[in-house]
Image (spheres, rainbow, N blue to C red):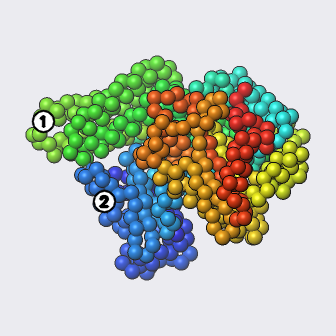
């Protein structure tokens, strides 16, 4: 049973996604409580009315908000008698809820990934899920894809990306093709901040980032591209935003279909605007996906619109949400003052950016005027509120909340018009198709090999390469290992055939349980430990090295440093970056590298044997990949 819900500040449901079991469970309760009449109950209808769901969950959601606003002590999870669990989190003032019978720890991870997907697809404007059906459907498909992939792919389960192990000639050809694609994009369309990458199934062949990018291509961005790639054949249409002075209307107009593009002689192209994390908030990027061969996907991503303006608008959503929360709490006047000061500073940046980009924003001039007008009204009301002090406090709160809502609507109009418009996608489609054709031509000779290689990257029984054969023979009793460089989150691990029932029942379940067990103990501050069951010996290690490859000890005890960190992983928040910062305060974290190693040995292996082999794997695993320390593929 599985369900995700998103509630706005009025407890209305703006998004719901659930499986068949949850539908049957709530349908039964709805009939028992009279929320669903016998006339409305249709066996062939798998949809639940949002009103029915809201009535069932309204008491819990209301209680959650009261605990958050009045006491600053909101629920993180609720456990029910029948084994059902609910977990909660917030983003931009919206309450995200996950209902399932899984363990709470696993559900918190799933909810953090769900919020990460919302950030990438919607940016700060979560309210777009209420009106944009295409985005709504894509989010549900991505969520289903992630659940399916994490049960099938060990790289997704440990939140890393697996590098396809190929020889230097293929790697060079791929990187050259990707570099040329970014250069062609810059010369043709003047988009200089771009990333291009090639996935073979769920494995990364190569990544190229243009030299004009300040921040690297993050793993959460990469895995978003991987997840969305599974939907590229039926990509939802990008929304066209039409803005007038009062409101924003969203019309879902279908993009040109793959069949139409095939008939015109161009490579089928799937495109969408996504939001990738930068130094300040999430910035809009154009995402283009092209299937250049069976299982081989070329992905081109580039930044669109003004970075300073888009980051300013993102910050405005964040600070306006904090200001609304401060108004609701009524207990911390300092928080209200600080949040308004931050909001005021952000709007000054926005106004400056709008002036600099005035010539490019003529189409949204009306929406910009509405935004500045409503901001002036809010400033005036806030000044009057401060002058009045405690007099007429309740009426002042109501008036301020109404003005905040008006400002938020105007902010949404401007944000969607500037950052969520499909014009940039449409004008680049032909150029991107031509670029993809060149990449396809460059890799044509290797396509069949790459597709086969993705299924068997390398295995513990592999004898295809002398180096792998020689390497693996040195570790008798080794069943499986996962080595992860947490600098760029590259995974090196033998492939396993999970299509075999024997392998699935014995090895896969053991691997997945080992990873979950290790994460729980990592949250307690344990960086290295071994354990065993009746079949296998297990070992987990997390350690740090300087930029010379020498091990270094944390300055702060990990058990103390980890207490305030998010759950281990990358897709929600980068746990490992936070861990390095917490363990090495006042240090240059760019020079500190973090690594993880999981090992499974036969039960007969001794602890000293496991420890010795683990050390040798960590020191020599680069012989398998051919890349010492798995460096990023930047040219």
Q: Residue at x 60, y 57 (%)?
A: 530
In the picture, the disc for residue 599 is none
| Relative side of 131 to 155, left or right | left
Q: Nearer the viewer, residue 591 or 420?
A: 591
* Cα separation between marks 1 and 2: 29 Å
Q: Position of residue 274 (x, y in %)?
A: 57, 40
Q: Residue at x 65, y 48 (%)?
A: 597
Dividing the picture into quadrants, the one containing residue 193 is: top right
| Relative side of 56 to 399, left or right | right
Q: Position of residue 287 (x, y in %)?
A: 64, 39
Q: Quadrant of the C terminus?
A: top right
Q: Secondary structure at mark 1?
A: loop
In the picture, the disc for residue 62 is 2
Q: Nearer the viewer, residue 564 or 176?
A: 564
Q: Position of residue 595 (x, y in %)?
A: 62, 42
Q: Residue at x 20, y 30 (%)?
A: 383
- Residue 432 in view: no
Q: Residue under circle 1?
A: 389
- Residue 41 in view: yes
Mark 1, Cα crowd under 10 Å, few <14 / some 14-19 / many 20+, is few
Q: Secondary structure at mark 2?
A: helix
């Amino acid at each position: 049973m599985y369900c995700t819900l998103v509630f706005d500040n009025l407890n209305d449901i703006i998004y719901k996604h659930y499986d068949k079991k949850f539908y049957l469970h709530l349908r039964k309760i709805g009939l028992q409580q009279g929320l669903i009449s016998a006339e409305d109950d249709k066996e062939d209808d798998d949809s639940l009315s949002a009103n029915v769901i809201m009535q069932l969950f309204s008491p819990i959601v209301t209680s959650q908000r009261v605990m958050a606003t009045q006491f600053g002590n909101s629920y993180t999870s609720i456990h029910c008698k029948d084994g059902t669990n609910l977990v909660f989190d917030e983003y931009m003032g919206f309450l995200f809820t996950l209902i399932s019978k899984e363990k709470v720890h696993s559900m918190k991870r799933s909810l953090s990934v769900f919020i990460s997907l919302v950030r990438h697809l919607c940016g700060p404007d979560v309210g777009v899920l209420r009106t944009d059906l295409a985005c709504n459907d894509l989010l549900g498909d991505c969520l289903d894809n992630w659940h399916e992939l994490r049960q099938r792919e060990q790289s997704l389960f440990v939140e890393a990306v697996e590098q396809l192990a190929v020889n230097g000639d293929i790697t060079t050809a791929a990187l050259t093709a990707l570099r040329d694609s970014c250069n062609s994009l810059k010369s043709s369309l003047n988009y200089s901040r771009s990333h291009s990458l090639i996935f073979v199934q769920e494995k990364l062949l190569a990544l190229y980032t243009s030299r004009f990018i300040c921040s690297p291509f993050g793993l959460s961005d990469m895995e978003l591209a991987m997840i969305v790639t599974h939907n590229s054949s039926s990509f939802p249409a990008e929304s066209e935003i039409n803005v007038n002075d009062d409101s924003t209307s969203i019309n879902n107009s279908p993009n040109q279909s793959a069949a139409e593009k095939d008939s015109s002689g161009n490579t089928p192209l799937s495109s969408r605007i996504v939001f990738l994390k930068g130094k300040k908030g999430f910035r809009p990027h154009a995402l283009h996906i092209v299937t250049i061969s069976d299982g081989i996907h070329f992905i081109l991503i580039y930044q669109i619109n003004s970075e300073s303006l888009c980051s300013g608008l993102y910050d405005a959503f964040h600070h306006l949400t904090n200001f609304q929360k401060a108004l609701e709490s009524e207990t911390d006047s300092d928080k209200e003052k600080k949040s308004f000061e931050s909001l005021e500073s952000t709007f000054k940046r926005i106004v400056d950016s709008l002036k600099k980009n005035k010539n490019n924003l003529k189409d949204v001039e009306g929406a910009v005027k509405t935004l500045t007008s409503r901001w002036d009204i809010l400033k005036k009301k806030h000044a009057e509120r401060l002058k009045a002090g405690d007099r007429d406090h309740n009426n002042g709160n109501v008036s301020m909340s109404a003005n905040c809502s008006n400002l938020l609507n105007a902010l949404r109009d401007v944000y969607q018009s500037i950052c969520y418009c499909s014009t940039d996608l449409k004008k680049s489609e032909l150029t991107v198709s031509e670029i993809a054709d060149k990449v396809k031509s460059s890799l044509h000779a290797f396509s069949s090999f790459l597709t086969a290689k993705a299924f068997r990257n390398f295995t513990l029984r592999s004898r295809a390469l002398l180096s792998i054969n020689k390497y693996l023979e040195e570790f008798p009793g080794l069943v499986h290992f996962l080595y992860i460089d947490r600098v760029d989150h590259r995974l090196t691990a033998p492939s396993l055939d999970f299509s075999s029932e024997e392998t699935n029942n014995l090895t896969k379940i053991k691997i997945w349980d080992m990873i979950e067990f290790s994460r729980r103990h990592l949250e307690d501050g344990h960086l290295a430990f071994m354990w065993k069951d009746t079949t296998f010996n297990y070992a987990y290690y997390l350690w740090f090295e300087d930029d010379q490859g020498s091990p270094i000890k944390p300055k702060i005890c990990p058990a103390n440093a980890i207490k305030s960190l998010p759950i281990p992983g990358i897709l929600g928040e980068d746990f490992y970056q936070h861990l390095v910062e917490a363990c090495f305060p006042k240090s240059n974290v760019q020079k500190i590298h973090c690594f993880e190693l999981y090992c499974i040995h036969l039960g007969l292996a001794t602890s000293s044997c496991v420890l010795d082999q683990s050390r040798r794997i960590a020191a020599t695993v680069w012989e398998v990949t051919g890349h010492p320390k798995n460096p990023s593929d930047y040219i």
